Image: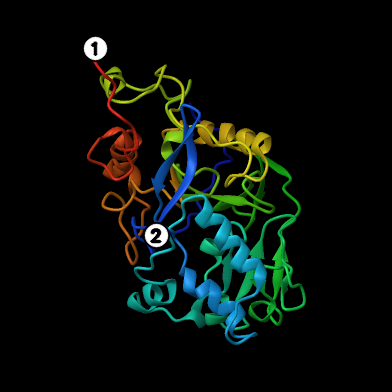
Amino acid sequence: MAITIPPSDATISVKACNTGSTETGLPAAQRNLQRTDLRLPPRAPLREENALRLGAEEKPGESFSAVQGLIKSWKDHGFRGLVLKKDIIEHLESGGLKPSDIDTVFWSHTHLDHIGDLSLFPATTELVVGPGSDMRGYPSHADAVLVEAEFKDRKVTELKDFPLNIGGYDALDYFSDGSLYILDSPGHCLGHMSALVRVTPTTYVLLGGDSCHHPGHIRPNALCVCPGHHLPLVPIAKPDEPPLTLPKGDSAYRDWDVSSQTLGKLQGLDADPNVLVLLAHDSTLPGVIDEFPKDVNEWQRLGWKEKLKWAFFDKDNVAYRFEARSNA
């Protein structure tokens, strides 16, 4: 199923930086009405101790309560800490770039595992956030999880106007040339957004952030039916329904109903053969897609979409989280 997108020859080079490790864990899905543990490689330059550092700089010997509470909540749900492999600054430097070379930083959302340490970028680097993002900063707000010193003296732009429709998403043509569409993708948290990037005149990469946390949330579905040979290996009732569902209640999804609507839109774009969906915590990606300083623009020619589509059904894949179905 192809999504209608206005034609353009303007393209962007997309380069993926894997800052995390599969040692990071967080229960973020449900399987058969029970939680399942997912290994999630974070793609942001942050460790748990970095989060604690934020408050320790203002109050020696202690971190501010909001961060402590957030990390405690994650731990209560099975979070084992963020394991940093290489932060974004190290990635940039390995490719011959300095923080001062970066004009704009986009936050998909304001969770600690996605924002990194903005203080490492100069004040000339603009920050762009989604609509309604909670930008309260500590210490002015004791219950904030952000540190106001990191963005106090820099330009912060909150996107609010999404006049287009791309695959059901409210969208903004950011550069007005069809190269980058910012997609309003609410549900996971306030201000969550995704990006649809044109990497060739006819192919795209969708940076999905935390719209969901595992490819088993997206596929199979009615638009992307699972081949029959996978069915004996995984506990799914039908070849056209995802094996994982978004958890209700106290979970990674602030608004379950809205998250589910966003997930449906994501499934539509994922079913387009010209769109490669990259989720921030998709542990099937390492070893398949090229990483910085290489780009991912030739993903279609290299066949990455087909390699990734059902990789999470492979029992030897790190993303496999299913018990084998009994033949009895």
Residue located 55% across and 42% down the image: 7
The three-letter code of the residue at mark 1 reads Ala
Residue annotated with mark 1: 328
Furthest residue toward top:
328
Q: CA distance from mark 2 to mark 1?
A: 44 Å
Question: Residue 192 versus residue 76: which sits nearer the camera?
Answer: 76
Q: Using the image, determine if residue 48 lies above or below residue 311.
A: below
Q: Using the image, determine if residue 81 lies above or below residue 30.
A: below
Q: Position of residue 164 (x, y in %)?
A: 69, 42
Residue annotated with mark 2: 16
Q: Earlier in the sequence, mark 2 or mark 1?
A: 2
Question: Residue 16 versus residue 196: which sits nearer the camera?
Answer: 16
Q: Position of residue 131 (x, y in %)?
A: 73, 54
User: Is 170 situated left or right of 85 in this image?
Assistant: right
Residue located 64% across and 70% down the image: 127
Question: Residue 297 versus residue 202: which sits nearer the camera?
Answer: 297
